[in-house]
Amino acid sequence: MSRIPEFDYSLIYGERTMRSVANTTRRDAAELLRVAAEIPIRTVVETFPLEEANTVLRMMKESALQAGAALIP
């Protein structure tokens, strides 16, 4: 067997994930935010035009977002 190559572990532990949820309605989101306010959970969402997707991904990579990001078509 060949040796496993070495690499910078900070590349693994600094990963970010972008998820899309297609089966959530506006009502679902409103209800979630209402419940989150009661717990309390502080929610922050920034919106961006879909054309800025690459910029948003770069911002996520650089930890430049302090919120969830939503791309708007």
Image (tube, rainbow, N blue to C red):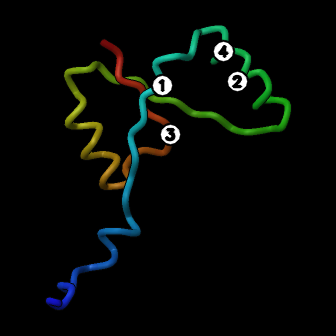
Residues packed near mark 1 inside 10 Å, few (<14), some (14 to 19) or many (20 plus): few
Q: Quadrant of the C terminus?
A: top left
Which amino acid lies under the numbered mark 4 shown in the image of this protein?
A: Asp
Which image quadrant for residue 33? top right
Q: Which residue was labeled with disc 3?
A: 67
Question: x%, y% of residue 65?
Answer: 42, 44
Element marked by disc 4 = helix
Q: Amino acid at mark 1?
A: Val
Element under label 1?
loop
Residue 16, x across and y down, in percent? 39, 52
Q: Considering the numbered disc 3 on the image, is that residue within a helix, a strand or a loop? A: loop
User: Gap between marks 1 and 2, in whole Å?
Assistant: 16 Å
**Does the residue at mark 3 contact the one at mark 2 (Cβ under 8 Å)?**
no
Determine the residue positioned at 14% across, 89% down: 2
The residue that label 4 is drawn on is: 28
Q: Which mark is residue 33?
A: 2
